[in-house]
Image: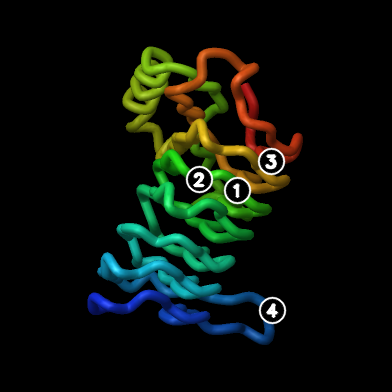
Amino acid sequence: TASLTIGEGCTALGEQFFTCGTYNDESGMWHYYNDETAVTLPKSLRSIGEYAFQGRLGLREIDLGQVETLGKSCFAYTGLVDIRVPGTVKEIPDSAFANCADAMTITLEEGVEAVREYAFAEDGRKENMPRGMWNWVLNAEQAQKAGDRITANGANPAYDNFLVIRLPSTLKEIDGYSFCWIYIQGLYLEWCQSPDMLPPFATDAFSGGPRT
């Protein structure tokens, strides 16, 4: 078990600050470890560097507080369950939360304006099991129906990893492959009353997952 508390007054974490993993020369792949990890960030923190927590599979939750800048792959290959990006972060960089295979929700709060390539992409599910089925969720009633579907399928091991994404009205750009190869139960857009109000996004932003 690893535990890390960063003291108040710290404003920035550098590149590879708390990353972990080993590279296997024979396979040409990185291997990460699932040791339980608890991290407490200070309210003063404003910047997190590239690869800062990459590979911390045992990191299940993080409160980003008032962080303003994220580095690429800063939380890639972590065990985050509820990914919540505060509105102080205007741009989510490449691969920032890539391969977070245990994520159940992704919430981008009001203020987030751009999601870059592979920000939340995955290269395969746990045991290659699909999360569920694609469903656009435009209002609270439909979101509740999506929740009912999650409950109904909860005992099915083939649907053990559902994912709901909540996007803000401030979002202006969604780059290609930003949500590539993730299996989505629904997009929850509380503010959206029709597809015409959706933010512009690359045609391949959500490529690779099932569509029903």
Q: Nearer the viewer, residue 171 or 52?
A: 171
Which quadrant would residue 93 be assigned to in this image?
bottom right
Residue at the far right: name it. Answer: 203
Whichever of callouts 3 and 2 sits on the residue coming sooner in the sequence is 2
Q: Which residue is mark 3?
A: 205
Q: Which marked residue is nearer to the observer: mark 4 or mark 2? A: 2
Residue at the image position 40 percent from the left and 43 percent from the top: 104
Q: Which residue is mark 4?
A: 28
Q: CA distance from mark 3 to mark 1?
A: 10 Å
Q: CA distance from mark 3 to mark 4?
A: 28 Å
Give the percent coordinates (x, y) of residue 200.
68, 32
Residue at the image position 37 percent from the left and 13 percent from the top: 141
Classed neighbour count for the residue bearing mark 4: other residues with Cα under 10 Å, few (<14), some (14–19), many (≥20)? few
Task: Name the secondary structure under disc 4.
Answer: loop
Q: Which marked residue is nearer to the observer: mark 1 or mark 4? A: 1
Give amino acid for label 2.
Val
In the displayed structure, would residue 5 be above or below residue 83? below
Quadrant (top left/top right/bottom left/bottom right) for the N terminus: bottom left
Give amino acid for label 1.
Val
Whichever of callouts 3 and 1 sits on the residue coming sooner in the sequence is 1
Residues at marks 3 and 1 touching, judged by CB atoms closer than 8 Å:
yes
Whichever of callouts 1 and 4 sits on the residue coming sooner in the sequence is 4
Q: Which marked residue is nearer to the observer: mark 3 or mark 4? A: 3
Give the percent coordinates (x, y) of residue 46.
40, 67
Q: Which residue is mark 2?
A: 112
Classed neighbour count for the residue bearing mark 1: other residues with Cα under 10 Å, few (<14), some (14–19), many (≥20)? many
Give the percent coordinates (x, y) of residue 207.
70, 39
Give amino acid for label 3.
Ala
Q: Which residue is mark 1?
A: 115
Classed neighbour count for the residue bearing mark 2: other residues with Cα under 10 Å, few (<14), some (14–19), many (≥20)? many
Q: Which marked residue is nearer to the observer: mark 1 or mark 2? A: 2
